[in-house]
Image: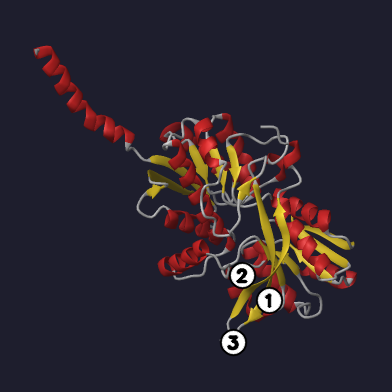
Amino acid sequence: MALTRRAALASALAMPMVARAQAAPVKIGLVTTLSGPGGYLGADIRDAFMLAADGGKLGGVPVQVLVEDDGLKPAQAKQTVNRFLKSEGVRLFTGVVFSNVLEAVAPDVLDDGAIYVSPNAGPSSLAGKNCNANYYVVSWQNDTLHESAGENANRLGYKKMFLLAPNYPAGKDAITGFKRFFKGEVVGESYTKLDQTDYAPEMANIRAANPDAVFQFHPGGLGIAFIRQYQQAGLVGKIPMVLAAPSLDSTILGAVGEAAIGMDVTSHWNSDFDNAANKAFVAAFVAKYQRLPTVYASQGYDTALAIGAALQGSGGNVKDPVAFRKAMLPANFQSVRGKFKFGPNQHPVQDWFGLRVEKGADGKLALVTKTRVLTDRGDAYSETCKI
């Protein structure tokens, strides 16, 4: 009888310890670019992710988000990720903006059996035969947003295009994606540097080629510099631009002003999307941060929601990637972009829209959604992915 009472007492005393252990937050390593010309891209991803995790939970599961700046340096990101893996016991990662950084850190995460969920970078190198069951992309496969720009150029009737992008994995995917869908002639093609600030030689080459329009992919501060110099070179109003979302987001628009009027952009999301989830997100983001969210913020928010759905469905057990994957793939969350599903390579299948920069009746510039360019588009690499 005494042994029974002692056993019961021991069990009762152990229960709070078990409860505390079960309630331990899931650590999420959010390594992103927070400094330099691309710093605001990572800041928007981080801020939107933290907005979704307000209250310290995702999908009802307690989380602890560990945020670090990668400085757009692959080696720095790699060092941080490995510290998180070994010293912090992190099994779930997100945050990377740039594809060259992701290509450096994703293999370390995946080789260790941990999980990576990308809120932005979607390089082709990880989308096809090198896909992985523990690797998910919530944003796009890099080629696809530029495929939409190529299709938009067709729709707008342009026959001769000059193409420019930085010489790194996403830049190469951008040119490849645009050319995959564009039906006209490419009269010039140029790879710039990822840290370039002076585009005078490119402006001269564009003027000499005299294309119907220019496609350029320069995210963040690079895009601001490019459009400003395009205006200074006297090309604004003479040679139109056809862009994808990273080359003209709301922050770039705010910086370049009326130089962007009439520019055509394609995106899977815009702040004016008329669905309940998006309206709530935009209102909450503006209220908390006093700025309009960019496409990067929309992706950071959706990534948090997708992770939340997977945590809820798997009971927060990130040490069981199979259970996490089973809960992740149905995409049981309300995306701010509207329709969303994962394709065979765990990259999005989604719609793409044509936007245009216009001045409203209030005199303010805005990206205005005009038309649907592509419907239920996956990517060109999914068929070679065997998970």
Q: Earlier in the sequence, mark 3 or mark 1?
A: 1
Given contact means CB atoms under 8 Å apart, are the residues at marks 2 and 1 in contact?
A: yes
3 vs 1, front mark: 3
Q: Residues within 10 Å of mark 1 (few under 14, many from 20)?
A: many
Residue that label 1 marks: 260
Label 2: which secondary element: helix
> Is residue 99 at all visible to an observer of this figure?
yes
Q: Residues within 10 Å of mark 3 (few under 14, many from 20)?
A: few
Label 1: which secondary element: helix
Q: Amino acid at mark 3?
A: Ala
3 vs 2, front mark: 3
Question: Compared to 360, does 382 lie above or below?
Answer: above
Q: Earlier in the sequence, mark 3 or mark 2?
A: 2
Residue that label 3 marks: 361
Q: CA distance from mark 3 to mark 1?
A: 17 Å
Q: CA distance from mark 3 to mark 2?
A: 21 Å
Q: Earlier in the sequence, mark 2 or mark 1?
A: 2
Rendered location of residue 340, percent (x, y): 60, 52
Q: Quadrant of the N terminus?
A: top left
Numbered circle sitting on residue 275: none
Depth check: give the residue in front, 234 or 28.
28
Residue that label 2 marks: 252
Image position of 29 (left or right of 381): left
